[in-house]
Image (cartoon, rainbow, N blue to C red):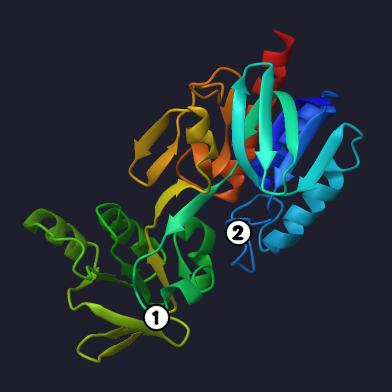
């Protein structure tokens, strides 16, 4: 059976898009591999009405609400290839299934390229974060470390003093000119240029000279790429942003391939649950309009 819309990715953006479409009584297939980007975090913050809630619970509740609509089909699988064109797309999955749809929406999220610092990956989403609006308040104005990954890290170090006393670890990645250094000093940011050996404890930084600096939490600006190359392999144009690579869309969330849309973290910056949900809701509405008009 041909679906009106195939949504690749069933996290917050994908579900928000699906909700608009099933409420318009359109047939929607969601293909989801179950790997939410924020699966490492115990609480979601900054999302109106859901502040402090376990993100797994938010996703579970949303899926249950969607599945109450009879035109929704949900399959737990991973899409590995998409082909075709407007009104005649096909998606193949790793389990060997093929699905046909008039429209396709990529809501695949992104992969985070973490700094190569021993112990950081194990603390990602727990005591090492990327968004101060999501996690800064809970650090209770304690000491905060910012680990450099590139030019965007300077912006992070300039912003995060709003949430606590900041130490900026250049870690051999960025070189500060006099103007930037003066700006950071004016913001009372401590600059630490000794490289990091590893992370320890909850959020302790061990330097190569064996000094240990303890923090309430750490931030780092990851580089992002779409979590799967499926949109690019279909022929969708990519765009470079200060945060990394994303799927390029127009104001209606349509990609460079007619009938193929993208939303959420894979197709916008900056990133948060709230912004992903809003982007998905808009994508769902515009896809519906493309089916009508």
Residue farthest left in this picture: 178
210 versus 249 height, above or below = below
Can the viewer see residue 140 in this picture? no
Horizontal placement of 132 versus 196: left or right? right
Front residue (pair 140, 17): 17
| Mark nearer the N terminus (1 vs 2) | 2
For label 2, the SS is loop
Q: Quadrant of the N terminus?
A: top right
Residue 168 rendering spot, x and y as whole percentages:
26, 69
Query: Going 54% across and 38% down the picture, which residue do you hit?
Result: 230
Q: Which residue is mark 2?
A: 45
Horizontal placement of 23 versus 212: left or right? right
Q: Quadrant of the C terminus?
A: top right
Disc 1 versus disc 2: distance between alpha carbons? Answer: 20 Å
47 versus 105 height, above or below = below
Q: Which residue is mark 1?
A: 215
């Amino acid at each position: 059976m041909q679906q009106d819309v195939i949504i690749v990715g069933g996290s917050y953006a994908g579900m928000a898009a699906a909700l608009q479409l099933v409420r318009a009584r359109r047939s929607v297939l969601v293909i989801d591999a179950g790997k939410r980007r924020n699966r490492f975090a115990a609480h979601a913050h900054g999302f109106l009405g859901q502040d402090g809630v376990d993100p797994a619970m938010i996703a579970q509740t949303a899926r249950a609400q969607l599945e109450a609509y009879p035109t929704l089909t949900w399959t737990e699988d991973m899409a590995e290839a998409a082909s075709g064109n407007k009104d005649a797309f096909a998606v193949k999955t790793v389990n060997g299934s093929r699905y046909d749809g008039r429209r396709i929406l990529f809501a695949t999220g992104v992969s985070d390229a973490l700094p190569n610092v021993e112990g950081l990956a194990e603390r990602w989403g727990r005591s090492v974060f990327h968004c101060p609006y999501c996690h800064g308040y809970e650090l209770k104005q304690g000491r905060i470390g910012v680990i450099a990954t590139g030019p965007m890290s300077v912006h992070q170090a300039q912003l995060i003093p709003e949430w606590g006393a900041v130490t900026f670890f250049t870690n051999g990645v960025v070189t500060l000119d006099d103007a930037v250094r003066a700006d950071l000093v004016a913001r009372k940011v401590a600059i630490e240029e000794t490289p990091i050996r590893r992370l320890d404890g909850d959020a302790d930084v061990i330097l190569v000279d064996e000094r240990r600096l303890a923090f309430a939490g750490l931030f780092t600006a990851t580089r992002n790429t779409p979590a799967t190359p499926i949109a690019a392999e279909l022929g969708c144009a990519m765009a470079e942003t200060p945060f990394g690579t994303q799927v390029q869309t127009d104001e209606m969330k349509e990609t460079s391939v007619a009938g193929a849309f993208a939303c959420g973290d894979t197709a916008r910056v900056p990133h948060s649950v709230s912004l992903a949900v809003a982007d998905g809701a808009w994508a769902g509405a515009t896809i519906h309009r493309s089916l009508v008009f």
